[in-house]
Image (spheres, rainbow, N blue to C red):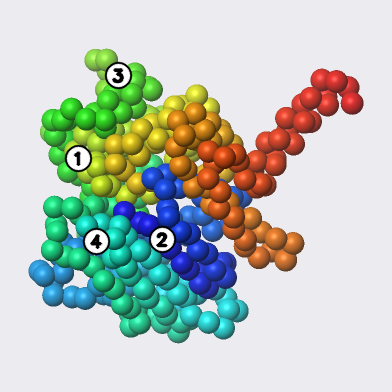
Amino acid sequence: MIRNLKIKNFQGFEDIEVKNFTPINIIIGENDTGKTGILKLLYSIAKSYEDFYFKEAYFERNYSTFLSEKLLNTFQPMKNGLGELVKKGSNGKLEVSIQFHDVRPDNFIRFSFGDSTVKRIIDCEYDIDLNHKDNAYNTLFIPSKEVLTAFRAIAITREQFGMSGFDDTYYDLILALRVPAQELSVNLLNKLNEDLENLFEGVIVQNSSSHGDKLPFIFKKGNTEFTMPLTAEGIKKIGILTTLIRNRKLTQNTILFMDEPETALHPRAVRNLAEMIVDMSKAGVQIFLSSHNYFMIKQLAIIAKKRKSDINCISLKKNVDKQLEYDIQNIKDGLPNNPIIEEALQMFNEDIQTVLGI
């Protein structure tokens, strides 16, 4: 799992350093504060590490090749390539140092590149233990937009035409969703799967009918079946999680990235999902999520305080010079100062003043 991270000159950030990531890590901030960028960077490193872990002997390539390709396919920069990820006007290189905690406590990856780098990272060093495959983890990214409706379009775009448009966070996810469902073992994630399905009194299932190639997923509610275009967005978001649990791609030792998972969910479902996110972490899943939803942030803070659970909150905001700043706080000790929190409190105060006629 990911332990520590240090970044310099990445997109709008001059530097970020996080020590001792917790089982759940939430990144909050207004639009255009770099939340998704940080998630994608972490995902690219972790996923390329996973791919290298299992494929390096077969492909006989070094890790920097896997990393370069994953960054390109995840961020899909324009003609200047990887150099576009370097902070504009920084006059320095993008530098990343990350530590994992696997069998040995100090597996690390360090790399850097400048704004003239197009496709290949040269400056890359790593210490990765490849001798303990039984202790390896897998990596998942769930984008803010659901993928079940566009499932075939994503596959055709990438596999038949080799076109960009859907980045690797989408393509990697449909590859994971293609794995057939298996019989669930008795564990915490089994119970969690039942709770997720009960949210909407139905279940997303892989379609085994003759039209399964055209309709890979359907929503079943009682004896009634619905295609994905006729299924509510919130149900599809939850259905992705239940499918990944059923086919055992989401399991113990998974690093799960979720970009605004509350999108299209009503407040009650958001609060329930927050509870389930904590339950997933208890089952051995490390979670990184972004949000600008007060219900999600507040509910996670309530759970953290109630259960005495450690949840890191990385709060992003722009200063008066429009430069990005960050702050890190364990939300079991309270919520950080952030424009999202401040806006919610301002709305509450305005409501009180209206009631009192002030």
Is residue 68 found left or right of 88 in the rendered image? left
Is residue 205 found left or right of 255 in the rendered image? left
Question: Residue 180, how many percent across, how many down?
Answer: 15, 39
Is any atom of residue 180 visible in this view? yes
- The label on residue 221 is 3
Q: State how far apart marks 4 and 1 are (Cα).
A: 25 Å
Q: Is label 4 in contact with label 1 (beta carbons under 8 Å)?
A: no
Q: In terms of image quadrants, where is residue 120?
A: bottom left
Callout 2 crowding tier (Cα within 10 Å): few <14, some 14–19, many ≥20: some
Precedes in sequence: disc 4 or disc 1: 4
Q: Label 2: which residue?
A: 4
Question: Residue 207, how many percent across, how many down?
Answer: 19, 33
Amino acid bearing label 4: Arg
Q: State how far apart marks 2 and 4 are (Cα).
A: 14 Å
Q: Label 1: which residue?
A: 248
Q: Secondary structure at mark 3?
A: strand
- On screen, 51 above or below 232? below
Amino acid bearing label 1: Arg
Q: State how far apart marks 3 and 1 are (Cα).
A: 23 Å
Precedes in sequence: disc 2 or disc 3: 2
Q: Label 4: which residue?
A: 104
Callout 3 crowding tier (Cα within 10 Å): few <14, some 14–19, many ≥20: few
